[in-house]
Structures are given as structure tokens and as C-alpha cells.
Amino acid sequence: MFKTEVYINRRTNLKNKLNKGIALIMGNVEASMNYPHNTYHFRQDSTFLYFFGLDYPGLAAVIDFESGEEILFGDDFTVDDIIWMGPQPKLADNAQKAGINKTFPFARLQEVVKKAQEQGRPVHFTPPYRGKNMMTMGNTLGVHPGKVKEMASVEFIKACIELRSTKELCELEEMERHMGTAYNMHTTAMKLAHPGRTEQEITGIIEGISMSGGGIVSFPVICSVRGETLHNHYHGNTLKQGDLLLVDAGSESPLHYATDHTRTSPVGGRFTSQQKDIYQIVVDTNNAALAATKPGITYKECHMIAARTIACGLKELGLMKGDVDEAVAEGAHALFMPHGLGHMIGLDVHDMEDYDQKLVGYDDEVQPSSQFGLNALRMGRRLHPNFVVTNEPGIYFIPALIDKFRSENKFTDFINYEKVEKYKGFGGIRLEDDVLVTETGSRILGERIPINPEDVEKMVLSGTK
Amino acid sequence: MFKTEVYINRRTNLKNKLNKGIALIMGNVEASMNYPHNTYHFRQDSTFLYFFGLDYPGLAAVIDFESGEEILFGDDFTVDDIIWMGPQPKLADNAQKAGINKTFPFARLQEVVKKAQEQGRPVHFTPPYRGKNMMTMGNTLGVHPGKVKEMASVEFIKACIELRSTKELCELEEMERHMGTAYNMHTTAMKLAHPGRTEQEITGIIEGISMSGGGIVSFPVICSVRGETLHNHYHGNTLKQGDLLLVDAGSESPLHYATDHTRTSPVGGRFTSQQKDIYQIVVDTNNAALAATKPGITYKECHMIAARTIACGLKELGLMKGDVDEAVAEGAHALFMPHGLGHMIGLDVHDMEDYDQKLVGYDDEVQPSSQFGLNALRMGRRLHPNFVVTNEPGIYFIPALIDKFRSENKFTDFINYEKVEKYKGFGGIRLEDDVLVTETGSRILGERIPINPEDVEKMVLSGTK
């Protein structure tokens, strides 16, 4: 964990934002896989990690915004536990590391929360996303587990978002330190992009690199020769010459900060000229969005710059037509890039997504859109120094979407469907970096993973055939 | 999945065992990691896999033991889903693969269960172990989610145990096919057992091999130079010359059958003579238990044979003393091996542990013991052909346990505490294979991972220094 002062400061900042009631901050418990004691890799709740840094299951905390009191709830291990588990830190020692002096057995959580409720004071919490925490919180709050989520505190969530959006120096150092693992994962995948290899094999190897580097993957790996399928966790294909391998993968640092990158490699090491044309548009779009990313601009504007770059490029290739500005305003480019330019990243790969994506990425000034494509943009609001966002434009040829748009006669002024039909089977290309907003502009975190087509080809060719 | 007939036969066998009420068999949903849409690797419920084979989230099934009717509950994907997820099989097509003709939307599950309840017919189910299923079942059954577990049907559980304990040929073939991945994981770990490597690094690499081989690890990897800590998932140590590296790791096959092996390697490639003495006792114990494993014997008897072999060996080294039979009867050897010889293995690494370990490993004939050590034996009952069990004896020097026994003056007739003190810091050795009970005896599944000390040394020395 970071130094104790980091957590004390964060809680002080939180207390400066709220002045009524208590915060109930639940840590996670182990998540059972196929029976109670067979569990997935433990992942602490991010809000709990942010304010307390303690990476153990079975904890909760209460912060009293009126008295300033902080209590850590948990249970010490018994002598019998220690025989099986080895020496374990005491709850009180863990509390000290987080700068907390008061500890209670977990069973007393309900009593403390109930007292605040009886006094008519608000109990602030973020929405639970795991069934077991819903049940514990239901018991603690005296409501049905299914009702807890809708009782979450918008005021508390907004305070957490304000704090967590701007990354501290120690957080940026942790993120940057872990970028080497991300680099390894992606360059290894490139070197393995040869005919005969399988998606499953490559997925395993890059998940292993993440784990060897100190943490689990930050989200389920996308490793597919069907890159046009955006939510694709099927790994059953064998790579063939001429395929494009899209790898969207990230790793958690030892302190659980996420990386998130996408690269798309030509299987066998050489792009076809058709592939290279589309690929170059995506590189140009990534670079244009990066150049635009700086304090003061909204990320929605960056998204629109990306959209325009894609539409221009596709028009040059004859896949789009008509007035580019009109096409982009109407959302015609979303046939090829139906998703947003990116999202905030930090302790979560989609940072703070458990709170409410709209509260994280939008505000009074910048409101979510309902237009297809733009409605999938997770982050729209104005950028500030030390925000970290992903920059992930892509171009896809999605047969089901092409058929749908065409049958609905959508965007016939802007889309050359005759030509688009010839790209069915092309797949998809996405290129994603993690970008820090600096005082004056922005920069990519870590050494940039090879992105120019010739560098990617070189990396693939240097690998195992 | 296996052929459709496999699942039809299993359900027919189940129907032959129960004749009243309905079975409610819940599939799993995705398990959220740090926000709702960021999920762990999907793991289907084993009971659902056994009877239906469908490896997708969001399904449930009802079997009516009176009418024989079978219904699969789930929801088809929408056109919008398909744009993001690519073409998806229809619920009805999936049902056909499992040999089921009737499908209902998931929302109708409650209605079907309620009807049976209103008719006063029993609703049989196994105990849920995930919070979200507890909540769904609570809603379905009209009870509080926290009450569902205690309503599980012992009659249904016993029927499932009877079916699943005896592995079918197709299951054994699947298990045996996947043993190559287990072999790779363990020999790779051996080759990496050199000073300067870290536990975390090795853990990542073997988890990656599992995933590349088609499935997640079957349980959280134990990879530790502190092998005496039995429940050890800490991977923060760097290997040093003279350490023993204990690796207890398994992999799930593509159809989710588990492997589970343990090997213990000398870091750097050479056992010290003290290490080799203890190691040889564990090899001898493993071999003695294997030789004893056959139809007709109880696994408790095999456990006692292992215990006796350990006590004999330790007496020869002067760590134990007195009458070996008496020592074993009183449980003195459990200072060194406080756990059981093994457990059943199949679709779960501790097969069917979600049901109730006592019902899986014990019966009217062989009852669980309360003696320390023997009380940790998961499988005690009589063996039958096509049972698969783990054979995993070990010897550990656990400082907290040595101190506890000594301070309580336990087993002073059998333990030479003066000498035992000198082994504090030794660590622990465990050697584990997966064993099939055949018609006439038993055999190890897959090629045996190197186990003799000279073979292990050779494997370590062949690796990266």
C-alpha cells in the first residue's frame, strides 16, 4: 500500500466534502467459483482500496462526517487459522497502516449503522455490485438485499468521483511503473501472431505475464481474429495467414491500478494493402485524438475529432461519401466506430464504473448523447491535469450492423454500401493507449507499444513462426 | 460438451432415484470483480454442467420427477446484443444440445416453481454458494436469500453424489486428455525453481499454461517456499538456494474437469541430505497409499497406511519415537501431516464440495472422525471402480503447531520435540497425484510428473538458472 499519510489525506479531503451522516464503506469478501472455499483471485473493492489501502477480505469501515470518527471493522485470525495460514497481521496493526485507531469486530457493524439510522442521520454508500455484499449490506441496513443498490448516495458518489478523477503523484508513479508489464503482454502477443497459433494459447500466455508482473488481468482479455465483434471473449479460433489479431488486454499493478491497451497485428507479419489502408486511418485517428487531449477541452470534443478523422479517411477510400462534417454530426461514421473514444482509468479499468458511468463521465456542462455511437462514449466531460483516459479509436466491419443500417436505408448520403459490402470479413482494428492529461497537454503513460504499421510488422516477424 | 445422450442418460438416472417434486438446477451468472460488467472468468455451476453441459451464464432448469418434464430457462440475445457479441446460439438450439425440447424465458422460472410449491410438492436443489444465486433463488422460492442454503434437499444431494462419484468413460477420457497441461505446469515450475526467481513470477507462468491449455486454474495456486503453511496464497518471496519450492496447482480442462497435483522441488537443483531424508519418506508414503488404493478398501484405511508410513519414517530419523501403531492410533503423526490423504476430484477439484463434504466423503459405514488430523480427511468411504481421488501425503514443520503441541505436552511419548525444534524453518513437502480406482487396483491419471528425488533434481537442473 501507499504511505499512511496518503490514506489519511484522502479521508480528510472526503470529510471536507460531506458534513452530515456517516459513510459505510464495504470491503469485498472472497468470491466463490464453484463451491464456497474455492475462490477467484481476491479483488478488493476500489473505493475501500482508495480510502484505506487494505487488500484483505472481510473488512468494512465507517467514517462519521460529524464527529470525524473512523472505525475499521473486521476479525482477527484465531490460533487455529494461523496454523493453516501462517502468521497473519492483526486487525489493529492493519488499521494503523491505514491511519485508523479504532477497530471493532465485524459483527458490530450493524449496531453502529443502526445507531446512525435511529438518529435520523444519512448513511452514505456506493452501489454494491456483488451479491454477498448486497446481502451483508441488506442485513446491516435492515432492508431487502435487492433494495440496497437504489439507496446509494449520489452526494457521496460525487465526492468520491471528484477525488478519484484527479490522480495523485503516487498513483501516477504506480501506474507508470506497471506499464512495462502491459508492454510485455502486447509485444509478446505480437510475436505470437503467426498461423497455427490459437487465440486461447496467446490469451493464456498474456494472462500469465500479467500475473507474473504482480496482478490479475484488469478485465477479461479480448484476443480475437474477429476484432469486429466488440464484446468478444471467445478464444476458439486458430490464426490463419491474412487474419488480423486484435488484442485488447490490461493488467492490474500490485496496488490494483489498471492498464488497458489494444493493438492489432497482421497474422504472419505483413498487412495486406487493404488492411494497411484501414490501419493507417486508425493510427492517424489515435494520434489526432492524442494531440487534441489537453486541459480545457472536453473529451467529447476529442471523440468528435477522432470521428472526423475516421470519416475523412474512409471517404478517401471511397467507403464514405458526401460532406464529412454533416456525416459526423449525423453519426454516420458510427457504422464503423460504434463505440466511444475512451474512458477514465485508475483503480478500475473503467474507472469508478460501479458508481454510475453518467456521473463519472458527464456533468451539468456535458450531457450524454442518445445518438447511436456517441451514446457509447463513457467519458465526455472537460479534461483537467492528472486525469488519465484511454484513447482507443477503431474501425470495424460488423456484418450485422451493416445489414441493419442498409436495410433501414440509414445514412445513404454518407455510406457507400456497395463498397462496404466488399469489406465484410475484414474484421476490425482498434489501437488504444493510456493517456495522462498534463498541465499543458497530454502524454502516453509508459513506453509506447509499437503502433506504426512497419513497427508492428517488425515485431510480429521477430517472433515464433 | 459431451454428446447429447450423455446428458439425457444422466437425467434419466437421476429421475430413477427421485420420484416426488421437482429439481431446481441453477446455472451461474457472471461474477463481478470490481464493477458489474467487469467479471471474472465465467465458471458454470458443476451440477448444471453435469446434467446439461451448457457453459453459458444466465440459465436454469427444472426437472419434474413426476411428469418427467424438463424445462430450460433462459433468454435469447437481442439484435443489439448480436451487433456487439457476434452471432450467438439460440436458447432453443442450446436446449437441443442438452436433449431438452422445452424452453421458457428466465422470468417464468418463479411461476413454475411456485406452482409446484402450491401443489405441496418438494422443490429439490443443492446449496447455493454465490450471493447472486442466493438472491435469485430467494426470489424464486419466496424466502429471504439468507435462508435458501438451509432448505437444500439432502435426498437430491445424495442422488447427485451417487451419480457423480463414479466417473463415466467420457469423463475419464476428458480428465486424462488434460493431464498433459498439468504435467507442463509442474515441470515448468520445476525448471524455474532457481535462486532469484519469485513465487509471483512462477505462479503467473503456470496460470498462463493452464489458460493456454483451455481452462482457468482449478483452484488458487499454491507456489511457496513456505510449504509448511498449508493455506498459503502469498506469493511475495524470492527463491533462495536451499529453499524447497512447494507447488500445488491444477487446471480445468475445456469441459471443466479438474487436475490437482503437488510437487516440491529443491531450489537450485540439489536436495540437502536433510531435505532428501524427509522427501524420501513422502515419496514412499505416496507410493504406499497408491499401492493400497483399490476397490473395496476405504480411503480412511489408505489414509491410515499413509500415516503409518510417515510415522515409521520419522521414527527412523529420530523425530518420532515409541510404538508406531499406538502413535498413529492416537494421531501423533498429525503434528507433521495435519491434513487428509485426499479427496474426490472431477468437475470440482474438491468434487461436490458445494453439496456437503460429509455427504461426499462419508456414509453410514464410514463416519467422520473428530481426532485432529483425521478430522481433515475429506474422503473416508469405501472405494469403487471409476472413483477418482487425490493421493497427497505431506510432511510439514509448522512452528505454531509445534509450539502449541509442545506447550500442551501432547504426544510426549511419540514426539522427540528436542529434535523437531531443529527442523523449524525446514518448510514442508507434499507430493500429490490424481488416481483412478480401476476394477482391480488403481493407476495414476496421465504421465506421472517426475517424483523421485533424482528425477526432480534433473528437471530443476534442466531449467533456467
Image: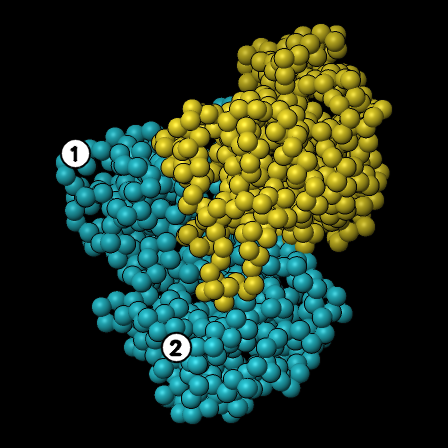
Chain colours: A cyan, B yellow
Closest to the observer, A396 or B286:
A396
Residue A307 x/y as whole percent: 42, 81
Is the residue at mark 1 from the same chain as the one at mark 2? yes
User: Dot 2, crowdedness within 10 Å: few (<14), some or many (≥20)?
Assistant: many
Residue for point 62% across, 48% down: B96
**Residue farthest to the front, as pictured:** B67
The part of the image, by quadrant, that contains residue A117 is top left
Residue A31, above or below A302: above
Give amino acid for label 2. His
Residue A447, above or below B100: below
- Using the image, name the chain to which the residue with label 1 belongs: A
- Using the image, name the chain to which the residue with label 2 belongs: A
The part of the image, by quadrant, that contains residue B361 is top right
Q: Residue A303 carries which label?
A: 2
Residue A384 x/y as whole percent: 31, 71
CA distance for labels 1 and 2: 48 Å
Task: Answer left or right for A34 relative to A170.
Answer: right
Between discs 1 and 2, the one toward the N terminus:
1
Give amino acid for label 1. Glu
The reply to whether residue B48 is in sight is yes
Residue A368 x/y as whole percent: 30, 69
Residue B394 x/y as whole percent: 70, 27
Task: Answer left or right for A143 relative to B188.
Answer: left
The reply to whether residue A440 is in sight is no
For mark 1, what is the residue?
A: A118
Closest to the observer, A5 or A383:
A383
